[in-house]
Image: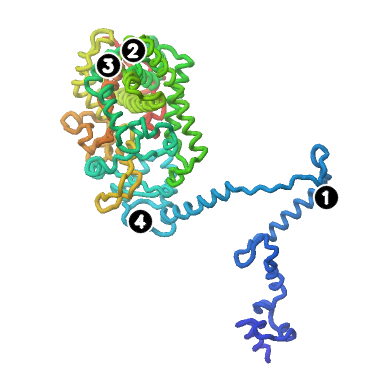
Amino acid sequence: MTYEELQSQGESVGSESKGLPADQIALLPTFKYKTGSKKKKKEKEEGNHFEFIPFRAGRRMCPGFNLALKNIQIVVASLVHYFDWSLPDTMDPTRIDTAEKFDRKSICRLVILLPIFFISLKKLGFFGSSTAKLPPGPNAWQLLRKVSEFRNKPHIAITSLAKLYGPIMSFHLGTQVVVIASSSSAAKQIFKTHDQNFSGRYLMTSVFCKLPTIDHCTLAMSRECGATWKLLRDVTQSVIFSSKSVHSKACTRKAKVAEMVECIRSKHGETVNLEVLMNSTISNIISDVLVSRNLVDITRESESDAEVRGVVREIIELVSSSVGLSDLFPVLRRLNLPSTKRKAMEIHGKIMYIWEDIVKERRSEKRDGVLANANSGGDFLDFMIENGFPDDQICNVTMELLAAGMDTSGMTSVWLMVELIKNPHILRRVRDEIASAFEGDDPTLIDESILSDSHYFQACIKETLRLHIPGPFLMPHCAIEACKIDDYIIPKDSVVLVNAWAISMDPDTWKDATSFNPDRFLESKIDFRGNHFEYIPFSSGRRMCPGINLALKNIQIVVASLVHYFDWNLPNGMDPTQIDMADKFGTVLKKETPLLLIPSLKKY
């Protein structure tokens, strides 16, 4: 047999299968001989002794055992060479504890999370898409490229994506389908055509799912429009939000505004954080409606008031930033994850801290037949107690109503003041129009009916709600069942968001949309009562904000008093047209920097 023949057999089938003798095998080049190499034989001996397989065996054998052995031997050799070792308390080395512990938790997590991980990768589009009927939208890589924009300005990032993918788009967050509508026609289908199906509330933060009484005593965060939700809707409408109830609290609003005006008069010529003052005043108006007492004392900054204000703000921020793993993988909500439960109980504890003593005190007064405040005989708290609601439910819904009113009305008032300061010609026009609503220097004599009939002032409020909409995405909805919008399927349990910010800035609807122009509303029939879907700052449909009447009354009396009684200047002689207009996304669209102004008594 020639060398070439040997080489051919070794190359094609392997010489061992041919039974070649050793002298002939030695003639073959080792780099072409598949099974006869001494080096190869030695490597294949590893993992062949199945009574000892710490690194497994076969083609899935651990490839890193050489590196592992080197690491182990040099570490241990150094320890035993350089040191002598003893056990604590002169313990006998032969009695050292050699008990083992199996990490069951890690294995369980792995078993649970690995399937979810691969399912989410498939749904995110890494292995191709199986959701052809979903609205179009960005894939995982495109979302990752915009992560910084989503973190800081999500309303702007979503609007820019809508220009690429259309007025209805979708994407995945983990395994959760998110559908976003960015046009008035799409909003109409969600809030009118399919209102019942999209009346579910998606609890965007997993923390809400663990809050006590979340299904029994809440309006905004109730999962569905069930019996309890309908009861609370009727109660709040009757006791707080109806025209009759709002009108009956006119004296309360005037009294709180009078406190604010006196506080500002005492700070003549000083720099005032007007945002804090306006928010505190509106908070006191709402808390008086709810429990007949001030939440804070705006005339003096006490430690207790600062603490209460801080706790309220902390609750709002904690809720808005509590996105967890189970938000991305809804199946995990069935698990009682310790971190989620701990955060939920932290929120619940802070809510009870604010309201629990107030509720107990009122119960005690009712038992004793004594009311400490003559005005406390017909507020929201009285109604809840008289109708048998337990303390924790009362505290939860009271906190919800306060936070909703404080954030939206407060920030709208701030933005309205900013726009008036920035546009002196508009400010002068507003002052002239509302002047007849005031009698002398006494804010308690304000005629609210004149403010409500001041068309240009009302147009300024409307334009502020358009240009600086409090909630850019409103509240998150949930698809109760799968349904069809246009040619797309919206799956059951999808998160459904309406990009009201994009709708209110649509150049096809609003001429010169980025400018503050109240005149656009003077001859327009467009209103914010939920019937005009190109303008929905208070949402629409059965989940529409019930507090519109109260919010408008609070905004108009606070801002009208500020512009009527005082002249305002920016610190350091800054030009009003240069005021910082940057916003910050949060529970509401806030002014990024505080509104610092210097008041001076207005000369009539």
Q: Which colour scheme is used?
A: rainbow
Q: Identify residue for label 4.
A: 131
Residue 199, image x, y percentages: 29, 39
Question: Which of pointers 2 and 3 lies earlier in the amino acid sequence?
Answer: 3
- Residue 479 lies, with reference to residue 286, above or below; the image says below
Residue 548, image x, y percentages: 26, 27
Q: Identify residue for label 1.
A: 81
Q: Identify residue for label 2.
A: 261
Q: Identify residue for label 3.
A: 249
Q: In which quarter of the image is the N terminus?
A: bottom right
Please say if the residues under marks 4 and 2 sit with CB atoms less than 8 Å apart: no
Residue 107, image x, y percentages: 57, 50
> In the rendered structure, which amino acid carries the disc numbered 2?
Val
Q: Secondary structure under badge 3?
A: loop
Circle nearer the viewer, 3 or 1: 3
Q: Secondary structure under badge 1?
A: helix
Please say if the residues under marks 4 and 1 sit with CB atoms less than 8 Å apart: no
510 sits to left or right of 170:
left
Question: Which of pointers 4 and 1 lies earlier in the amino acid sequence?
Answer: 1
Question: Which of pointers 3 and 1 lies earlier in the amino acid sequence?
Answer: 1
